[in-house]
Image (spheres, helix red, strand yellow):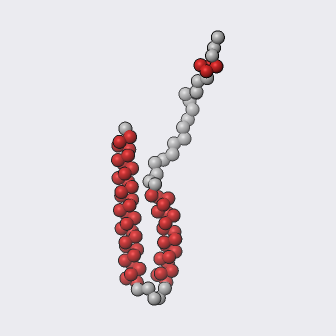
């Protein structure tokens, strides 16, 4: 007599869907950069804003984005190393 519990075995040929390891900051960066680009465009076309102030804010945003990306990349590599 075969027990029903023992009769079912999952197929070994089942395929798993693989999702590529994406940096979690990419969607966040896209989400934040669209409104910031629109605000930057308004500030750039406004004659009352000094251009040096606008360029300084753009440089600051780029530097902070690079630092955040580097930290996220480092955390991702550290997590991969400790996973194994």
In the image, 70: left or right of 15? Answer: left
* Quadrant in which residue 72 is drawn: bottom left
* Quadrant in which residue 16 is drawn: top right
In the image, 74: left or right of 11? Answer: left
Residue at the far top: name it: 1
* Residue 4 place in picture, x, y as percent: 64, 19
Quick check: 81 above or below 46? above
Q: Quadrant of the N terminus?
A: top right
Quick check: 33 above or below 82? below
Which residue is drawn at the image coordinates 40% and 74% (left, top)?
Answer: 58
Which residue is drawn at the image coordinates 47% and 76% (left, top)?
Answer: 40
Along the viewing direction, whichever of 1 and 35 lies nearer the viewer? 1
Which residue is drawn at the image coordinates 40% and 70% (left, top)?
Answer: 61
* Residue 37 place in picture, x, y as percent: 49, 72
In the image, 42: left or right of 62? Answer: right
* Residue 28 place in picture, x, y as percent: 48, 60
Which residue is drawn at the image coordinates 46% and 62% (left, top)?
Answer: 29
Q: Quadrant of the C terminus?
A: top left
* Residue 55 place in picture, x, y as percent: 39, 78
Total label count? 0
């Amino acid at each position: 007599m075969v027990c029903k519990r023992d009769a079912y075995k999952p197929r070994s040929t089942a395929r798993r869907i693989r999702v590529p390891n994406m940096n979690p900051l990419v969607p966040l960066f896209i989400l934040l950069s669209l409104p910031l680009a629109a605000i930057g465009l308004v500030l750039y076309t406004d004659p009352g804003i000094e251009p040096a102030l606008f360029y300084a804010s753009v440089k600051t945003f780029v530097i902070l984005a690079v630092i955040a990306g580097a930290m996220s990349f480092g955390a991702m590599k550290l997590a991969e190393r400790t996973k194994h």
